[in-house]
Structure formats: C-alpha cells, structure tokens
Amino acid sequence: MKNAYAGKGLRIDLYNRRSTIEPFTEQMRKDYIGGYLLGMKILWDEYRPEYGAFDPKNPLIFCTGPLTGTRAPTASSLTCNTMSPLSKTFVSSRAGGHFGPMLKFAGYDYVVITGRSPRPAWILIDDDKIEIHDARNLWGLKASEADAAMKAIAGSDEFETLLIGPAGEKLVRFAVASCNIDRAFGRGGPGAVMGSKNLKGIAIRGSKNLGLANMKRFNAAVQKNFKELEERDPWSWEGMPKVGTAGWMEAVNYYSMLPINNYQKTYDDKIAGGIDHNAYLKNFEYRKYACGNCALSCAHYIPTIKKGKYAGLSSGVLEYETAAAFGARCGIGDIQAVAKANVICAEYGLDTISCGSAIAWAMECYERGLVSKKETGDIDLRFGNADAMVHMTELIGRKEGFGAILAEGTSRASSIIGKDSGKYAMQVKGLEMTATSPRASKCGAVMFAVNERGGHHMDPYAPTIEAYGYTIAEAGIPEALNPYEDGNTGAVYKLKNYTKLADILGTCAFAVINVQTLPDTYGEQFSAATGIEMNGKELLKRSEKLTTLMRAFNAREGLTAKDDTLPERFMKEEVDVRVPEENQKWTNGKTLIKRKINLRKNLRDYYVAAGYNMQTGLPSRRKFEELGLAKVADNLMARGIKLA
Ligand code: SF4
C-alpha cells in the first residue's frame, strides 16, 4: 500500500461460501472517498426497497476511510451500512477500536457480505487467507465468550473480532455488532442483520504496511490537526482523557438537555448527581481505554465496581449515552444499576441507547396505565425502579416475556400495545432518539427531525454547538446561534455536511463534534496521504453528496418530508428549561424559561437553506448533477418522485 488505500474490496457470499476481490479504482476513490459515502453508494446500488432488512440480499457493508489506520488524530474508524431492521431506513454506524485499521492492514478498503449461510458461520481473514468456518459451537455464546473462542480457534490474540451476542442471533431489532466487545456498531440493528445471515462474527489479522503518498507533508498536517484539537476545544482535549464522556452528564443537566423520565423533564440535579463523573469516581476503579491511535481517549474501561450490590462486576466501557439511557431516561440516579445494565447489553449485544429508551417508554406507559403489571410479567415498571430496569434489560437480551415486545423497538412495540402509547415512543423514523432533549436547542430539534437515519445525534452535534456558542466560519457558521429562538436553522445543513467529513475520511466524530478540525486541514491530510489533491471545499462537496445520497435512499424507500418530524411531546408540552448564566444574554437575563418547539418554522428555514422541495425533502436535479449523482436523480424521477 503506497497511498493510504489498499485499492481493493473483499466480497463474501455466505450462501455459496465464496470470497472475491474487486478493485477500488482511483476514480471510485475520488468520487466516493470511503466510509459512509462509499458504504451508501454500495447500498444504493445493491439494495432494493422490496428486499427488507432480513433478506439475504441485503448487503452488510463495512468500509474504512482513507485515513483509517494512519497517524491522523482519532483515525480508527470502520463504518457499517445496511438496511435497518429497526428503523424505516438504513443503518449508518461507525465503530472505533482496532478492527478498522486491521482490515486495512490485511489489504482491504472494505468488505461486503451477502447471502445467508445455511448454518451458523464465522469468517476468518488472515491477510490473503479467507475462510468460512462452522459456528454451531459458537452460537448462543455471549460476546466475551465468543470473542475468546474465535481467537482461540484462530490461534492468536492478535486477531481483532467483530461479532454478535445472543440478541443478534435472536434478531432483537436493536442488536449491535461488537468490535472486540469494547466498541460497537450500535445504532439501527446491524447485529440483527448479521444474525439473519447466520453470521456469528469475523476475526481478522493483517500484516501489511500502510504507506502514504507524502509522509513529510502528512506529518505536518497531522501536527496542525493536533494543534486545532487542543486550541479550538480545550475542554475535550484536557477533560476527555480524564473522565471520558461521563463528564458530559453534569453539563447536559446544567444546560437543560437531559431526557429525564422519557423526556418529560429537562433536568434533575439528584438523578444527574447519581450518574455523573463524580459518581463514576466514587463507585469505580478504572483505567483508560482508547481506540487505535487515539490520543483523545474518550472512553474508560471500568474493571470493577468497588462496593455495593454489584461489587466486583466488570462493567466495560460506560458512556454518557448509556448512563443517560438507563439512568436519566428511566429516572434512576444509580450508577451501579446503570453499570449492571451496561454489562448485560455488552454480553447479549444490545444497543444501550435503544434498550434504555424502550424501557423508559414502557415505564411511562406503565405509569399512565397503558401497560399493566400482568403484561410486564409482574414487574413494577415505574420510573426510578432500578431493579425493574435491570431485569427488563435481561429479558430484552433473552427476548423473553415483555422483553420480547420491547426487543421490537419502541415504534413497533407501540403498535403492539396500541392505545395512546405511540405518543410516548421517543423515536424519529423508527430509531430511538439519543439523549439530548431538544427544547434547549432549536438546532438540536432540527438535527433530530431531518436526520436521514432517524433519531441520531452525531449528524451534527448541534446542541453543544449552540449551548457553547462555537463558531466555524469555514463551514458556514460565522457567529454563535441563539438556542432558544425558533427559526434561523439553515446553519444545521452546513454543520451537517461539515460533520460528515469525519465519517467519509475514517476519523472519529470527536475530531469534529465541537468544530475543531478545519476542513482544509482534512484536505491536507487526505491529499498528503492519498496523492489525490482535494481541499476542504471539495471534501465538503463529497459530504453534501453523502447527505443527498442518504435523502435519495429514503425517498426510494417511500419517506417524504412528513418523516422529518419529532415525537409530538416536543411541540405540545411546554416544559421548564434552565438557562445557564452564559446564555442569559439570549433570554434578557431570565434564568428559567418555558419551551416547546416550533418545528414547522425551524424545518422551513432548514429546507430553504438545503434547497429542498417542501413535500419530498429532496434537492433539485441540478444539485444531483452538480454532485455527480445524475443517475440517482434519474432513478427517483422514473419512480415519479419529485425533486425541487
Ligand atoms: S475519541 Fe473516543 S471513540 Fe473516538 S477514536 Fe478516540 S477513543 Fe475512540
């Protein structure tokens, strides 16, 4: 490898037990770069709306980016694209860890898996050696057991693994695919797609050198990038390695964005205090964990809970989102119970965000009399009941009792329960929302509503940008935004395309989440690594191409502007929002305001900025052409779908 790309992709057909190599041509690299953009291109070409997520023909696509495995900050990414069994749309999920770099070192930029194995199987990739093995003896194993077993059979701990737990085998719709257990493709159910293919996992080892086109130029660009991370976002640079994402809890509560009791309230000092970084320090002994080549190290590996009911329990990486899912959403200020639920999710292979969200939804339904104790299997599913939350997590992992209903995700579960329960399902396009209540961030509200993959937070992380008043003139945000005044949300479109730079290049979102890495710095790193000259502006066009391709995929699936919406709670229920001192300039000094979202106004401004048709949510044919997507536009028009 001379220029950061391996120059080839691997295809594995599980039914015919066949693997083939295909070229990843220079033209394709220029047009589709890597990561999500490449993954969406393959998904658009190979998936058809009539298939469904569990059809063997639904491709499971894992892509590296050109920077994956290099010394660029946070460059550990592997992305996953497939049709989601949970939401109305596609999976677009990123995992760090070490599997992505190892795929590159084995000599592949991407791998596409199709077909269904007649019996449980796992794949071994050892550089050029590709083997499909029988996994009947691994089926049913929890994630850590499967990881150990696959490495033992492969004959070395040098192998990195990507695997599912029992939840994926049982087609729990929000099952994850774990990378060495500590990292996961979490959102939208890629683990269930693996399960539907009878694929327990992949073990990979690579020994090839990753060469770069111009090492000296690349090193200079990397140094510049480190400086930006340090200077443009000192909190993350200094704070993340100390407390990880756990450090966010206090701030999210302070800024009134915590989803207390299934988003009924926006803050609660007692609950937040029981699950924040101080609670971490008090309850756990931990050591630092980082994905491959990451100096930011946002996560912490927690070997043991010091004392109490779960003393001695090894919890694994415990993130803000997980603490918010099982803690804040469920009204539980008990970090030990959260850690226990986290372990269950890691071993069964469950997305902690959707799992905690499903339980919080069930708790609200239970308290409102929409779900009875008989239905829950005699579990007193009230907000604040930590034992009930832990028990229900286990039932979801096993897909048993009421857990089997929650394993369908909140959208389908509310169709099963009926009555008014759908009102309390906090999901967008079928994907449970991540843990940022949007009342204190109008751009956050738009971020969730327009997100092509559903209730996702990484695309972009608008709430922090508004709350902290971050600016990035180079990506179209020259001044701070007022989070409490509806309208003027056009910046979200620019921000979204900026954030996607990380997704296509192979770095982690934490390099852009607080607008740290400048587009031209990415351009320098990309050009020096690959020998393909492209500046920040040109890369931003590739990001816009990705947003547009995602929109087109959704339109082909029958989604329209009507699907760009939020749970009605945010538009109808006016709640207290605490205004931190630094943001009281926007509220005439008021420390507490009442807020609900005017989504119509916010969406209109976003659509105008994006140039979208107000009914279909699609840009003009000219925009498709400008982005090199003329054939995609033709396809949509042939289906009678109107462009702007
Ligand atoms: S910032 Fe965190 S998730 Fe991102 S690469 Fe580093 S350790 Fe991994």
Image: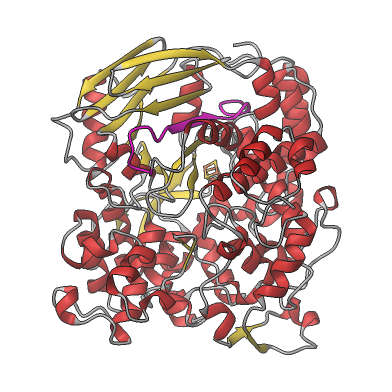
Q: Nearer the viewer, residue 182 or 67?
A: 67
The residue under the point 59% across, 76% down is 254
- Spot occupied by residue 321 in the image (x, y as percentages of width and height): 46, 60
> Magenta stretch: residue 63 in it?
yes
Which quadrant of the structure image shows residue 341?
A: bottom left
Q: For the N terminus, give its image quadrant.
A: top right
- Spot occupied by residue 149 in the image (x, y as percentages of width and height): 21, 29
Total marks shown come to: 0
The residue under the point 73% across, 90% down is 590
- Spot occupied by residue 605 in the image (x, y as percentages of width and height): 77, 66
- Residue 585 in the image: above or below residue 95: below
Is there any visible trace of residue 520 in the rendered image?
A: no
The residue under the point 79% across, 69% down is 488
> Magenta stretch: residue 154 in it?
no
Q: Nearer the viewer, residue 476 or 213?
A: 476
- Residue 50 in the image: above or below residue 323: above
Residues drawn in magenta: 52-70
Ligand 1 sits in quadrant: top right
| Apparent side of residue 439 relative to residue 158 in the rendered image (left or right) | right
The residue under the point 66% across, 46% down is 547
